[in-house]
Image: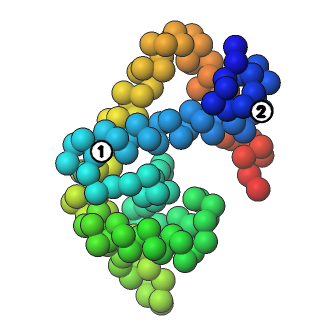
């Protein structure tokens, strides 16, 4: 099967692309559905903050590391989400200059919808792949997640 939009036949695509494109499709779907559900100010870059396990209680530097971006870029996203009313930054427990991110009520509402949407995505993938193949896919991805393959 050929995939001209990716420039190579599907059976020769490398693992990075095979993982990246479905992940992007899920993120685009999430933003589209959030936008339809009265969270129309969220954009794709915000997913760097709103991706699992979420920002609640995390320091901005941790969020930047998770997203693979600079602290400065993450702070720009956090500022955007703060201005839009999804998060607030508070002093970290224990004092010092450290700050943590907290979801606002609007942020919690968006997060709850994200979780619902992800369940819907899983249900659709399960329907397309079949119960057994979906379970195998999830098991394999869980093994990869827990392995040193995804640590750098």
Q: Assign the N terminus to one quadrant of the image.
A: top right
Badge 1: few (under 14), some or many (20 or more) residues near its Cα, within 10 Å?
Answer: many
Q: Position of residue 33 (x, y in %)?
A: 31, 39
Position of residue 112 relative to residue 29, above or below, is below
Q: Nearer the viewer, residue 91 or 38?
A: 38
Q: Quadrant of the C terminus?
A: bottom right
Residue placed furthest toward the bottom? 96
Q: Which mark is residue 14?
A: 2
Residue 50 percent across, percent down from the top left:
42, 54
- Secondary structure state at the residue bearing disc 2: loop
Q: Is residue 136 visible?
A: yes
**Front residue of 150 and 95:** 150
142 sits left or right of 128 in the view: right
**Residue at image location 38% in from the left, 54% down from the top:** 43
Residue that appears at 72% across and 46% down: 150
Which residue is drawn at the image coordinates 51% and 70% (left, top)? Answer: 74
| Depth order, front residue of 143/3 | 3
Residue 99: mark in rendering: none
What is the spatial separation of the Cα atoms under label 1 and label 2, in whole angstroms? 31 Å
Q: Is residue 126 above or below residue 65?
A: above
N-term-proximal mark, 1 vs 2: 2
Q: Is residue 144 visible?
A: no
Quarter of the rendering containing residue 32? top left
The residue under label 1 is 34
Q: Are marks 1 and 2 in contact (CB under 8 Å)?
A: no
């Amino acid at each position: 099967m050929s995939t001209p939009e990716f420039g190579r036949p599907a059976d020769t695509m490398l693992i990075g692309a095979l993982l990246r494109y479905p992940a992007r499709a899920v993120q685009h779907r999430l933003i589209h559905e959030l936008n339809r559900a009265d969270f129309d100010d969220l954009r794709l870059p915000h997913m760097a903050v709103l991706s699992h396990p979420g920002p609640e209680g995390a320091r901005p530097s941790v969020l930047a590391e998770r997203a693979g971006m600079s602290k400065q870029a993450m702070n720009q996203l956090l500022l955007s989400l703060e201005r839009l009313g999804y998060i607030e930054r508070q002093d970290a427990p224990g004092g010092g200059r450290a700050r943590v991110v907290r979801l606002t009520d609007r942020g919690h509402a968006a997060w709850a919808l994200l979780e619902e949407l992800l369940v819907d995505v899983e249900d659709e993938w399960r329907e397309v792949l079949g119960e057994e193949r979906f379970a195998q896919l999830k098991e394999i991805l869980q093994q990869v997640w827990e392995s040193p393959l995804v640590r750098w």
